[in-house]
Image (cartoon, grey):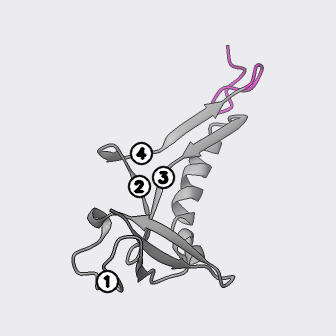
Amino acid sequence: MTYLVEVPVHSGGRLLVQVTPEDIPDELELAAVRPGEIIARAAQPLEDALDQLKPAVEAVHDRLMAMTPDEVTVEFGIVLGAETGVVVAKGSTEVHFTVTLKWKNGSRRPGGTGPVA
């Protein structure tokens, strides 16, 4: 059984996010009670919710780029909620990031101390 939360978008559109009863805070007053219907509208537009992630993403980027890799990949899940905006999703029992750093042959070692052996 799932419900929908409507998240407004600045351009005038909307994003419908599927939620389960476990995702709905007890104190949230629902606009609908039947599964499949829109039960709530997010308090802030999608862009504003995603802006909350910017300082954390920039911090991760800056620290990883200091290791001078040729490529960086960071993966994490996000949860959109009617009241909370955006939250980093938990992975199994803990919140996690998946980070991949790549150095190509002849690239410098992390910290810029010479070629990788």
The crowding category of the residue bearing disc 1, from other C-alpha atoms within 10 Å (few below 14, some 14 to 19, many at least 20), is: some
Mark 3 touching mark 1, by CB under 8 A? Answer: no
Query: Predominant secondary structure in magenta?
Result: loop
Q: Nearer the viewer, mark 3 or mark 1?
A: 1
- Count how many numbered circles sit on residues in the image: 4
Q: Nearer the viewer, residue 11 or 95?
A: 11
Q: Mark 1 or mark 4: which comes first in sequence?
A: 1
Residue drawn 28% across the image and 85% down it: 29
Q: Residue at x 57, y 44 (%)?
A: 74
Q: Amino acid at mark 1?
A: Leu
Image position of 99 with respect to 78: above or below: above
Q: Pointer 1: what residue?
A: 30
Q: What label sits on residue 89 in the rendered view?
A: 2
Say which label, 4 or 3, has the lower sequence index: 3
Q: Are marks 2 and 3 in contact (CB under 8 Å)?
A: yes
Mark sitting earlier along the chain (3/1): 1
| Left or right: residue 58 compared with residue 41 | right
Q: Secondary structure at mark 2?
A: loop
